[in-house]
């Protein structure tokens, strides 16, 4: 009888150890998942900030480019106006 009980106790002890080991493994996996989840959230925030900075940079660059083109256009109009006035001044000398 005692031998049978000792066998049952050994089996129960082995089962308890197995469950404890599985629980420890689950805890480790949970910690890894939690860490990975935090990393992914941080990475998503970084990507969002990066995209925002790229869009802002593109907007600033395009705004500067538009201003430069507008200045070029205004200078072109002024150059044509000066050229027209110069030719009219030269023509008035011949009159």
Image (cartoon, helix red, strand yellow):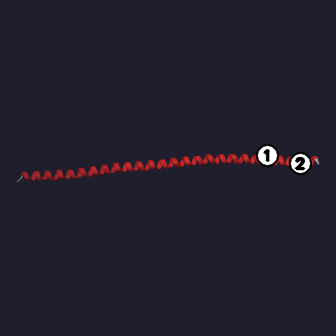
Residue at the image position 20 percent from the left and 50 percent from the top? 79
Marks 1 and 2 sit apart, C-alpha to C-alpha, by 15 Å
Q: Nearer the viewer, residue 84 or 15?
A: 15
Q: Nearer the viewer, residue 17 or 55?
A: 17
Kindly check if marks 1 and 2 are in contact, taking CB atoms under 8 A apart as contact: no
Question: Residue furthest toward the left?
Answer: 95
Residue 58 in the image: x percent, y percent? 40, 50
Residue at the image position 45 percent from the left and 49 percent from the top? 52
* Left or right: 92 in relation to 43: left
Quarter of the figure with the C terminus: bottom left
Q: Neighbour class for label 2 at 10 Å: few (<14), some, many (≥20)? A: few
* Left or right: 55 in relation to 46: left
* Left or right: 68 in relation to 83: right
Residue at the image position 72 percent from the left and 45 percent from the top? 24
Residue 49 in the image: x percent, y percent? 48, 47
Residue 10 in the image: x percent, y percent? 86, 46
* Left or right: 29 in relation to 3: left
Give the number of the disc on residue 62.
Answer: none
Label 1 vs 2, first from the N-terminus: 2
Secondary structure type for disc 2: helix
Secondary structure type for disc 1: helix
Residue 28 in the image: x percent, y percent? 68, 45
Count the numbered circles shown.
Answer: 2
Give the number of the disc on residue 7.
Answer: 2
Q: Neighbour class for label 1 at 10 Å: few (<14), some, many (≥20)? A: few
Residue at the image position 47 percent from the left and 48 percent from the top? 50
Residue identifier under label 1: 17
């Amino acid at each position: 009888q005692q031998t049978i009980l000792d066998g049952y106790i050994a089996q129960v002890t082995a089962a308890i150890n197995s469950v404890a080991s599985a629980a420890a493994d689950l805890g480790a996996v949970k910690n890894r998942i939690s860490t990975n989840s935090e990393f992914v959230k941080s990475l998503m925030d970084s990507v969002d900030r990066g995209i925002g900075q790229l869009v802002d940079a593109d907007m600033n660059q395009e705004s500067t480019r538009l201003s430069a083109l507008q200045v070029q256009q205004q200078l072109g109009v002024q150059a044509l106006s000066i050229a027209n006035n110069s030719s009219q001044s030269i023509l008035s000398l011949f009159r």
